[in-house]
């Protein structure tokens, strides 16, 4: 396996380029660094807003649950999803704050990969679980308590977390390459590792969007059928 010294390679390329071409590349890199710095400057702000809103929502839900003002079974998945939002907000804000001018573009790509893996799976599974709960409560109102017990709902919430973490962990080699491109040949080559992971991520996102939209479409059709029959 051949290891490439990126610094030496960049120096050799610079020797074979004109001064005007070098200036154009440096200006392009400067614009890229400026844009990524702007993104990382705004990211913690939105993360803090999301964290505050999610924490307030979680406190309100827990207060209502403890006061028995809302059904615990129907809101258990929402509590799990809100905790995931808090976790994501803290992680994204911390990563954005610790990034510097040299790692800004790499950090943006790493955060985007995190959203496309953990965020997509957590969001899709939570939506599907809420839709199924709503469907059972409407079609089987008398057996809802026994079918959707607290233990089963806890297992469902735990399964969504495990699935999201395992799926995002599968992309750890690609995250390593994004943070340190010099490890590409050793950790995750493009043709045998990066490209299959990218294709899988795109396919999962498409399937997730189609599944959630189809599920909501079925719910709307069911509600229209019930309204028509009534």
Image (tube, grey):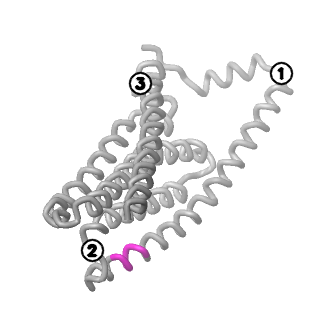
Q: Which x, y percent locates residue 79?
A: 33, 67
Name the mark on residue 105. none
Counting residues from the start of the chain, the first of labels 1 and 2 encountered is 1
Which dot, 1 or 2, sits closer to the camera?
2
Residue under label 1: 18
Which dot, 1 or 3, sits closer to the camera?
3
Residue under label 2: 71
Task: Tell me the CA gap for discs 1 and 2.
Answer: 70 Å
Q: Which x, y percent locates residue 5?
A: 55, 23
Task: Tell me the CA gap for discs 1 and 3.
Answer: 36 Å
Q: Secondary structure at mark 3?
A: helix
Task: Tell me the CA gap for discs 2 and 3.
Answer: 46 Å
Residue under label 3: 193
State the quadrant of the N terminus: top left
Q: Using the rendered view, name the quadrant where residue 65 is placed.
A: bottom left
What segment carries the magenta color? 57-61
Q: Which x, y percent locates residue 187?
A: 40, 27
């Amino acid at each position: 396996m051949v290891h490439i010294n990126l610094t030496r390679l960049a120096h050799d390329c610079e020797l074979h380029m004109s001064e005007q071409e070098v200036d154009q590349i440096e200006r392009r890199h400067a614009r890229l660094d400026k844009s990524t710095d702007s993104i990382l400057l705004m990211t913690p702000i939105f993360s803090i807003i999301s964290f505050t809103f999610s924490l307030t929502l979680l406190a309100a839900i827990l207060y209502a649950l403890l006061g028995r003002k809302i059904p615990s079974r129907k809101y258990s998945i929402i509590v799990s999803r809100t905790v995931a939002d808090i976790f994501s907000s803290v992680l994204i804000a911390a990563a954005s704050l610790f990034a510097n001018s040299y790692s800004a573009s790499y950090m943006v790509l790493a955060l985007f990969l995190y959203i496309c893996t953990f965020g997509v799976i957590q969001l899709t599974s939570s939506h599907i679980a809420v839709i199924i709960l709503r469907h059972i409560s409407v079609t089987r109102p008398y057996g809802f308590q026994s079918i959707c017990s607290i233990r089963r709902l806890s297992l469902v919430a735990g399964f969504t977390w495990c699935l999201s973490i395992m799926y995002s962990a599968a992309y750890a080699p690609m995250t390593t390459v994004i943070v340190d491109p010099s490890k590409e040949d050793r950790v995750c080559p493009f043709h045998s590792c990066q490209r299959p992971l990218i294709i899988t991520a795109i396919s999962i996102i498409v399937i997730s969007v189609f599944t959630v939209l189809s599920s909501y479409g079925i719910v709307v059709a069911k509600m229209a059928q019930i309204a028509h029959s009534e």
